[in-house]
Amino acid sequence: MKKNFVLAVLISAFVTGGSLVMAKSGGPQENANEAKLARQAKITKDQAQETALKRAPGTVESGELEKEHGKLVYSFDIRNAKGTIDEVQVSAITGKVVRVEHESKQQEAAEKRKESKEKH
């Protein structure tokens, strides 16, 4: 009986976690687009993240592969020691930092509101 309960809890956690991953990742269409971009990249996300953290030390809150201004970049939001966000973009082709932008608390709040509206 105890084994069945533990098994049920594990299955429930797995199913719930899988649903959350799909919800966060944007679904099959977005996953297919990201996979297509990943095939074009010459460096890995981990390599790009290491480069970004050297430029802006802190904690990576998010990271994605995207086309921005015609360039394939990994974009990372890094929370720094001051508690604000540095957005660092690393070329997915060369592995070099192509842009760093510091967000104030007000800019960060405005971006979160914008993202919230886009999701709904």
Image: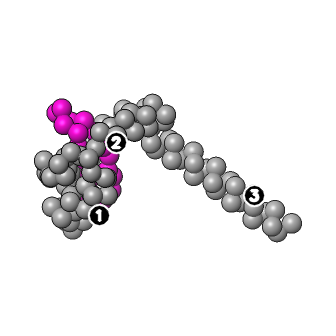
Quadrant for residue 66, please give it.
top left
Q: How many marks?
A: 3
Q: Quadrant of the N terminus?
A: bottom right
Q: SS at mark 2?
A: helix
Residue type indicated by callout 2: Ala
Specify start and end residues of the magenta stretch as a single range: 60-80
Q: Nearer the viewer, residue 5 or 113?
A: 5
**Where residue 90 appears, x then y in whole percent?**
20, 50
How crowded is the residue under tag 2: few (<14 C-alpha within 10 Å), some, or many (20+)? Answer: some
Residue 115: quarter of image: top left
Q: Earlier in the sequence, mark 2 or mark 1?
A: 2
Which residue is pictured at 25% across the width and 55% down the height? 48
Three-letter residue code for mark 1: Thr
* Dominant secondary structure of the residues highlighted in magenta in the image: strand
* Residue position for label 2: 38
Q: Is residue 37 left or right of residue 53?
A: right
Q: Which mark is residue 59?
A: 1
Which residue position holds label 3? 8
Is residue 40 visible in this depiction of the protein?
A: yes
Q: Indicate whether residue 88 is drawn in magenta.
A: no
Looking at the picture, does residue 64 appear above or below residue 118? below
The circle on residue 86 is: none
